[in-house]
Amino acid sequence: MLKNYLKVAFRNLWKNKGFSFINIAGLAVGMASAILILLWIQNEVSYDGFHAKKDRIYEAWNRAEFSGALHCWNTTPRVLAAAMQRDFPEVEHTCRVDWPRRLLFSIGDKRLMVKGNAVDSIFLQVFSFPMLEGALNGGYNIVITASMSKMLFGKADAMGKVVRIDDKDNYTVTGVLKDLPNNTRFAFDYLLPWAYNRRIGNDDQQWGNNSTRTYVLLKEKASLLSIAPKMNVIKTRYDSTEKNWQMFLYPMDRWRLHSKFTGRVEDGGLIEFVRLFAIIASFILLIACINFMNLSTARSEKRAKEVGIRKVVGAPKGGLIAQFIGESVLISFLAALVAVGIVLLSLPGFNTLTQKQLYIPFGSIWFWVSAIGFILFTGLLAGSYPAFFLSSFQPVKVLKGTFKAANALVTPRKVLVVLQFTFAIILIISTIIVTQQINFGKDREVGYERANMAYHFMTGDIDKNYQLIRQELLSSGAVTAVCRTNSPWTQRYSDTWGFVWKGKDPNDKTDFIRENADQDVVATTGVKLVAGRDLDLVHYLTDSNGILLNESAVKAMHFKDAIGQEIRDDDVVFHVVGVIKDFIIESPYTPITPMVIVGAKQPWYNVVNVRFNSRNSSEANLKKMEAIFRKYNPQYPFEYQLVDEEYTRKFDESRKIGTLAGLFAVLTVFISCLGLFGLATYMAENRVKEIGVRKVLGASVAGITTLLSKDFLMLVLLSFVVATPIAWFAMFKWLQSFPYRVSISWWVFAMAAGLSMAIAVLTVSFQAIRAGMANPARSLRSE
């Protein structure tokens, strides 16, 4: 019997090649899209899931109120780890991970800038990054990844080899790690022991300096509930100035997807995008299955006599259902083979788009179990309705030719077409609005001159030779202004709530972005002065105690006239010399934060900023700049960053989401149109004699095209009516997460309606015009 079913199934596929192609192609594209999305989702939900002790690993977080709101964040004092290890018997280990650094590694003539972290030696016992050999010890030792080992030593064994770091200290390789998986929050090519921080003076014992990440491994039977009350008060226990400050432990399984807080409560995060794309994957697969259902039921007349004869000779209804579901599973299997091919071809581009390293794990038994389940699920979903529909035909009516139902106003096929295009139109509207929001952020006034501005980190001898470098840059004609700052102009490295000024409320907890600069910061960055002047150490020696405020800082400090006001930071008194217009240093979708730029009295500099001479070409300016930096810092590579490009990277994540949404919207429309094309083809075939009679009686091609198209266009129009409120509500909720956002305009829906109608017309009209132009003599010859 099984052999007979397979033979019938393959004969039907071969006999109706066009419809078989549409069915398989639609399912294949839908399955391929769903597979790509599921690979992405699997990568996201499995972040850091490979650590053996993941159920006991936590990250220490702060919770405190600033600027009138409760904030949660995951950088902590460097002294917290030792305090927890000492005070909490529930803790097995604590370890710290400092901010990543790019350091110069030298082996003979080979010199490489590599990014890594300084960590406590217990780090590799808390986390399960697989060691190929060795271990992380203290002292002048280092652990490197396999890739870094290959870069430094080629095929030679790295163990015991000595590398020189920043032309200062020699470190011995005592361990080699496997390359990190692509689904971990950590990204390093080397690990230095924490002692490195002490050597460079970066291991302060202040409870007010929240600048490192602290990880905690609880003992096996320890309760998070028992440790929570002690975590709440550990900060205030050691720092009596912060009475309402709390800390808490955050579990590893929440880090990647849930670590966005509003007050005390988790409020979204990447989990929102995981859910969004899971819904999109379901929509696309469902639309592909709807195609199969529609085409199978539309062609029911072709299979009706087969069903009638089988029933007459005794075939049970269950057997017929099994046969038709088996045929849909077979088509699902064939489509899956095509889908895997599409995925393999698409993965390189998809990985580039998502910045991941996704792959199909053919060697995993779970992959094959999941693949079989996915094929069966798709086959059952696509074939269930046609199976029950076809098996329900009554033999007497079928064999008499009277089984056809009247052309009802509402039929399952019409409902499925409406459902299909509803999903497509929702995605079209959503893609347009997402693109609008991205462009809204890109077009927002940034507040400074991004073009012709670049920066270089202060590596090696740049700090020692800065004045010579500055002088030569200016005299070369390549740049018009130079300044030093503690962070790039597109990022914040530091913030503080510790400034004191006249009239400050003792309970004021306004958080200020803190920037350090020496001089000419306005001239270099192109920010706009509202009042006062730039920092100028040449003409005003007291400007080492000068300070600049942005407009938001002036409002926060309630200054009517800010110029000349004194602001105290610990034991240093600064005086305001200028006020600058607000500018965007963080996300262009968030409100401007109060900002203070302190002068050279507190010289904390990481970056040299330059303003290029616009009269020269960029290539000429960079060439001169490179020659000067190489002259005074010959051991380090010249690695500049253009501020305009750096700012554009702020949109990478939102642009990626928008591109993915647009891509899947196009695929959804394509699959929907594929089904519509198949239905239009079958409709034209079924009405070929009617069309012939109409042409003989004088009907025009345009009239016949309209006749055959109008029913489909009415269904698409109904889909738009259904999709509009759903899309509006979804996009309205999404936009609420942006303090700066576009409004939802009526023309977005008009454009979506026009696009969907135009696509439907183009899809259906091809077959309608073809049927209208056919020679009626051929269709009426048998009459």
Image (cartoon, rainbow, N blue to C red):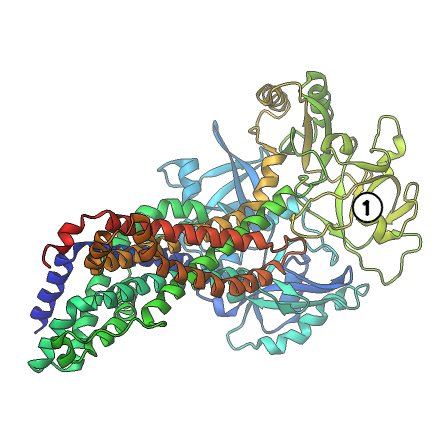
Residue 629 in the image: above or below residue 175? above
Give the left or right position of residue 529, taking residue 15 as reference: right
**Nearer the observer, 265 or 97:** 265
Image quarter of residue 539: top right
Give the left or right position of residue 586, taking residue 349 as reference: right
Residue 11 rendering spot, x and y as whole percentages? 10, 61
Task: Give the residue displayed 84% in from the left and 30% down from the top.
Answer: 536
Quadrant location of the C terminus in the rendered image = bottom left
Residue 13 rendering spot, x and y as whole percentages? 15, 60
Image quarter of residue 402: bottom left
Give the left or right position of residue 376, taking residue 590 as reference: left
Count of numbered circles in the view:
1
**Nearer the observer, 431 or 463:** 431
Task: Give the residue displayed 47% in from the left and 29% down from the top.
Answer: 108
Q: Which residue is mark 1?
A: 551
Quadrant location of the N terminus in the rendered image = bottom left
